Image (cartoon, rainbow, N blue to C red):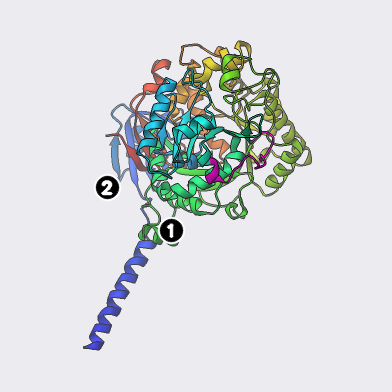
Amino acid sequence: MKKKILLSVFVLLLLAATSICIYIFDDYSHRNNIIFYGGTILTMDDKTPTVEAIFIKDGKIEALGNQDQIFKLKTSKTELINLDGKTLMPGFFDAHGHNDLSSFLYGMTDISGFNHKTPAAVWQVAAEKVKVTPSGEWIICKGFDPILTKGLHSPTIQFLDSLSPKNPLLLISQSLHSFYGNSLAFKKAGITNKTEDPTVSSYFEKDKDGNLTGLIAEQEAFEPFRVEILEVFKKSLAENATNVMFENAKAGVTSISTLGLSAANKNILVLYEHLSAGTSKPLYKFLELIGKLPERKPNVRHFIYLRYDAPKILIPESVNNGDDFYKILGFKYWYDGSPYIGSMYLKEPYLHSELTEKGFHLPEFHRGEALIKQEDLLSSFDFMQSKGFQIAIHAQGDNAIQEVVSVFEKLNKKYSIEKYRNRLEHCLLLPRELMPQMKKLNLTPSFHINHILYYGDALKNDILGESRSEKILPINSFVKQQQPFSLHSDQPMYQCIPLLLLNTAVNRVSESGTVLGKEEKISVLEGLKALTIYAAFQFHCEDKLGSFVKNKYADMVLLDKNPLLVNPDEIKNINVLQTFVAGKSIFLKK
């Protein structure tokens, strides 16, 4: 009897072990066999701009061209999908996002100017959140914006203490470059009025008596708060990350990016690799089995740039890491800050206006300044490039961009840097005279184009003035120079909606209807390329993604209308119906 019991237990354990092994070594299938036809198929390939049909096999484009020719390739296993007159094109890239921050902020209390038009509405929402939050728990409000919410002024630490006397409270600005905390928030982060500022440009603001005002300026100063908050909210990170990726897929995005990721350990990288990589790892599948990682299924691709000062534990041994679905490409730097708190680095001063004086608290003749010394930047660039990693650097102001380009020039004199395809990020006031140098260096920009839509009026009337505002975001100049560029939303600053980016790039109209930089409007086709094949070039994957060409991956988005044929003002109203990565549907509009 005892032997039978032991045998039964052994058999059960063996079956359990076998089941676990089957689970952790199993993965979703990459196989498919589909022909799409019956609509408009835009390829983003200049040699063959449109085709009648496209044949997808096992995640890649097997053939494309005339419908009769493609139908000859079908077998009994081929699925035929009639597009019913809709438009199929390569999936969009989110060329510059912060998916770690988006995951962190997902579901937090919104006080943005998109949804709250008066200061009273902002503070009412924050107060209501305080009422329902147990004492001692963190309260995070996102989207603080004195530009979109007219009359909203920076809060003092005393006001925030009165608003939330029993909870640490943190307000995150829409620009993600300034933050405001109450006394309990500073206490939780271990910051006092004796704490040294990380840098001259990133600091804990103090009044004339040396007391904290509540303002936290730029990323380095925010770091101790970020670490504290991440520890509190880490339980919801996996679910939030999954939701953020799905929101991207709903917008037609097939490749996302995270620029400036940093963490104390590799947990977030494990999560992202598990969610996006082309093949699963048995260890990650086991963690999924026991509930430590979310379910793995077809998902958006994910390309990552670590913070330039990321811990060594996060840095891969080689740039040849990951696969075509998930990869750490390089490192992200910040040379200046945001136009909307006065940390953009300019040649000429900011306008002296009510907004810059009372909203930003800027002294007259303020121009901003560099966040990193040029010699330190050159040394760090040299180290990163010697390891083969790409560099992406935040540079908004004209002085910032000029100095960054000069650093790249110095590095290029030491050895050629063209192969790295380094990037300039945001590029609000990119001087046109630098474009030939950038082309020589193979240095390409990613434009934060919705500065025009949301903040164009403030830039013109209160921050830069009319003359400089007419020169912002010179995208058509890059079209004329035949140099690739991309468009981005800087998620979570703005929601990632590629068709809205396209709408702004084509029309260059602010919310009030003002056109800024008419000569820098681009064609719809060039805008689509900036969201697909040009962005793929920046990510070193134009041979695999970004256009419909034989043997490339079948990353696709199905639209209800052809962007090339609708009224340019209506591009933003085009609907995403379905999104595919490697021929697998990751979103279907119901």
Residue drawn at the location 37% of the way across and 67% of the way down: 21
Residue located beneath label 2 in the image: 76
Instruction: Name the kind of residue labelled 1 in the image.
Output: Tyr
> Within the magenta stretch, is there residue 214?
no
Q: Main secondary structure of the magenta part?
A: loop
Q: Residues within 10 Å of mark 2 (few under 14, many from 20)?
A: few
- Frontmost residue, 434 versus 223: 223
- Frontmost residue, 527 versus 496: 496
Find the magenta span and give its range. 186-202
> Within the magenta stretch, is there residue 191?
yes
Instruction: Name the kind of residue labelled 2 in the image.
Output: Ser
Residue 325 horizontal/vertical position (percent): 47, 47
Relative height, residue 89 to residue 329 (above, below): above
**Residue 284 circle label:** 1
**Residue 213 circle label:** none
Relative height, residue 48 to residue 347 (above, below): below
- Frontmost residue, 151 versus 334: 151
Residue 295 horizontal/vertical position (percent): 36, 52
Left or right relative to 136: residue 410: right
Which quadrant would residue 468 be assigned to in this image? top right
The quadrant in which the N terminus is found is: bottom left
Relative height, residue 251 to residue 390 (above, below): above
Residue drawn at the location 40% of the way across and 57% of the way down: 292
